[in-house]
Amino acid sequence: MQESSLQGLINIAIDGPAGAGKSTVARRVAELLRYVYIDTGAMYRAVTLSALRAGIEPDHSERVSRMAASLDIRLLPSENGQKVLLNGEDVTEQIRSREVNLHVSQVAAVEQVRTQLVGLQRVLAGRKGVVMDGRDIGTHVLPDAELKVFLTASVRTRAERRYKETGQADRIDLEQLEREIAERDQKDREREISPLICADDAVVIDSTSMTIGQVVSQIVELSRTKKVEAK
Ligand code: DC
């Protein structure tokens, strides 16, 4: 028997569209269970930031993937959740800029970039005890995850949440933000490789009228059931 299953550790996959609250929820669930939180969107964002800085067109798949292969991306736990290091530089804030928001879907559609990042994500989850959030975690990265959650909310609610999160300098009006989120959803859903879809065995949680605390409690409760089943 594997060491991880003796300790009763499971992997939890949380997928869903932008602004559904995945990262906040995933981070809190990980804290409560003392699991490791892995924000896979941050990895695609770090590659995007690097491409923009290097003046590489985000949809130039060959150049983007060549550049991505040379990057050292690390996710470290920190007081505010997770620190993202790109070749040793702390880019936690820069990867949330509007510029990155606007181009990350293009970078995330590049096959070689996905292959590379998925490899890294699987290594990170190898010992179990991970809460990983993204778009393709339950369907592709960790198809054997013991618990899969598909977290969603209405476009309006998601835009409102992102609006509150955005710094003053980057702030745009809510309607524009709503359009950009809907556009990004569409690109993520329609791309050929690992599109955003709900895994057949995922539990769907619509957080439109739920508090973060309610969503977190539901997932922690589900994880207890899955842990018992996994033993
Ligand atoms: O969750 P987020 O907004 O930080 O994700 C940024 C982008 O990366 C988003 O457009 C979708 C993409 N992404 C992906 O394609 N696959 C993942 N596992 C995570 C994010």
Image: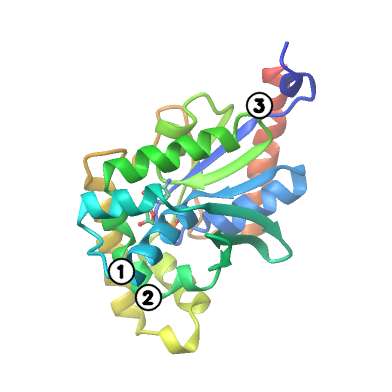
Q: Extreme bottom residue here?
A: 169
Q: Image point 51% across, 52% down: which residue? A: 72
Q: Which residue is mark 2?
A: 98
Circle 2: residue type: Arg
CB at mark 2 closer than 8 A to ligand 1?
no
Q: Which of pointers 2 and 3 lies earlier in the amino acid sequence?
A: 2
Confirm whether residue 50 shows in the render.
yes
Instruction: Say which mark, if any, is on residue 9.
Output: none
Q: CA distance from mark 3 to mark 1?
A: 37 Å
Q: Nearer the viewer, mark 2 or mark 3?
A: 2
Q: Position of residue 142 (x, y in %)?
A: 49, 30
Which element carries disc 2, helix, strand or loop?
A: helix
Image position, residue 172 (x, y; %): 36, 84
Between the C-alphas of marks 2 and 3, the distance is 38 Å
| Residue on which disc 1 sits | 102
Q: Secondary structure at mark 3?
A: helix
Q: Is residue 1 left or right of residue 39?
A: right
Which residue is rendered at x = 62% and y = 59% of the image? 212
Which quarter of the figure is the C terminus placed in? top right
Relative to 209, 219 lies left or right: right
Callout 1: few (<14), some (14-19), or many (20+) C-alpha neighbours within 10 Å? some
Colour scheme in the image? rainbow
Q: Residues within 10 Å of mark 2 (few under 14, many from 20)?
A: some
The reply to whether dot 2 and dot 1 touch (C-beta < 8 Å) is yes
Say which residue appears at 73% left-offset and 10% top-offset.
Answer: 1
